[in-house]
Image (tube, rainbow, N blue to C red):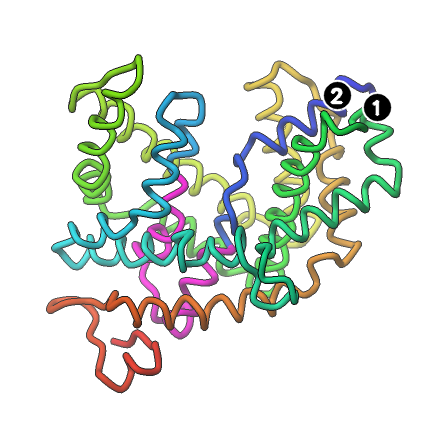
């Protein structure tokens, strides 16, 4: 494999998702389990828990860092502005994603099962994979040895771990992909209003501190298309799993997805099977065999945190009894 192509695989994997925490199926799994199973979770909740990552479509703007922090730490803005059942369902998921005490917290900042609470599960596994690839000579083959390439190596490993965990989730419950695909495709239009009201004003205010100042219409012209693009990405990504009938089919679909991305974004030509081989090899390593334990612990943790922060449906939506609030359960 030519070095240019190998480097292209690194770039595509590393930049395709821009390292969320849990990926789409991981977040959806957590939401379904918080609700007590797929039968109790609605589509807007499933889409909502993925939605804070819509800001990844604004990576190349001067507002990305601000918006990432705002959507992942000031998430209550969305909940406080949700006044209809559909809006509350979207906001319930949105809040459950957060990086302060939500699903992202255990993935990025503090694992519940690995014995080292100073690192999130995805971060710890990415570091282990980066080291393992070094021992196997992978970085030598890619020409990515040396400290200057370590951030890129970790970014690559971060995304590989997320893909592999999603594959494991799909293998345990293939139907989750179709549920997420339908959820994204049918997400309530009020999601755009939530983005507008929760983040339009803060973006305008922040932009005044930059050289790229925005008025409100200009801010919305950035935010709203990003959410729409993200909705399309979730639909497409979930569809890669939903249309597969076995593991090889998933890997083949992901391979085609990454090849197309390489061509469109970087003008690189990847050979068929290269990305699939990389993902399949990491899956066979068993590095994330303990992911179900971390996901299960995350479900309990986030469920309890939602209850502790009084994130419960109001009249017209879901209802929570005092006993269930104490247990951290959300019920109909």
Evaluate if marks 1 and 2 touch, with contact meaning CB atoms under 8 Å apart: yes
Looking at the image, which is closer to me, 265 or 222? 222
Looking at the image, which is closer to me, 237 or 98? 98
Q: Is residue 165 left or right of residue 57?
A: right
Which residue is denoted by mark 1 in the rendering?
1
Q: How many C-alpha atoms fall within 10 Å of the one at disc 1: few (<14), some, or many (≥20)? A: few
Looking at the image, which is closer to me, 108 or 225? 108
Q: Which residues are magenta?
A: 26-53
What residue is drawn where x is 71% and y is 44%? 279
What residue is drawn where x is 21% and y is 70%? 318
Up-down relation of residue 231 to residue 243 (above or below): above
Which residue is denoted by mark 2 in the rendering?
5
Q: Whole-Å distance between the Cαs marked 1 and 2? A: 7 Å
Q: Is residue 77 left or right of residue 135?
A: left
Q: Locate residue 222: give its quadrant.
A: top left
From the top left corner, tell me how far across and down residue 328 is, in percent: 34, 77
Magenta stretch contains residue 36: yes
């Amino acid at each position: 494999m030519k070095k240019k192509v190998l480097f292209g695989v690194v770039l595509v994997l590393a930049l395709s998702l821009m390292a969320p925490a849990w990926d789409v199926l991981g977040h959806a799994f957590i939401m379904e389990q918080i609700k007590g199973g797929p039968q109790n979770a609605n589509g807007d909740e499933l889409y909502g828990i993925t939605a804070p990552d819509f800001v990844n479509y604004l990576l190349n703007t001067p507002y990305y860092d601000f918006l990432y922090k705002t959507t992942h730490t000031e998430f209550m803005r969305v909940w406080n502005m949700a006044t209809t059942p559909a809006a509350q369902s979207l906001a319930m998921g949105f809040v459950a994603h957060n990086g302060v005490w939500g699903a992202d917290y255990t993935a990025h900042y503090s694992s519940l099962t690995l014995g080292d609470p100073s690192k999130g599960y995805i971060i710890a596994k990415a570091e282990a994979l980066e080291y393992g690839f070094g021992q196997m000579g992978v970085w030598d083959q890619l020409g990515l040895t040396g400290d200057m390439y370590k951030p890129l190596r970790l970014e690559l490993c971060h995304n590989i771990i997320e893909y592999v965990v999603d594959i494991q989730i799909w293998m345990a419950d293939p139907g989750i992909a179709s549920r997420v695909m339908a959820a994204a495709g049918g997400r309530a239009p009020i999601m755009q209003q939530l983005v507008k009201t929760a983040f339009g004003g803060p973006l305008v205010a922040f932009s005044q501190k930059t050289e790229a100042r925005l008025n409100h219409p200009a801010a919305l012209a950035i935010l709203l298309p990003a959410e729409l693009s993200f909705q399309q990405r979730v639909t497409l990504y979930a569809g890669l799993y939903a249309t597969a009938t076995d593991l090889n089919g998933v890997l083949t679909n992901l391979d085609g997805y990454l090849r197309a991305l390489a061509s469109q974004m970087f003008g690189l030509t990847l050979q068929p099977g290269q990305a699939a081989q990389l993902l399949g090899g990491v899956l066979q390593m068993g590095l994330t065999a303990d992911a179900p334990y971390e996901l299960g612990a995350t479900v309990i943790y986030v469920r309890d945190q939602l209850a502790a922060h009084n994130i419960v449906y109001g009249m017209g939506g879901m209802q929570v009894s005092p006993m269930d609030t104490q247990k951290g359960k959300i019920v109909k």
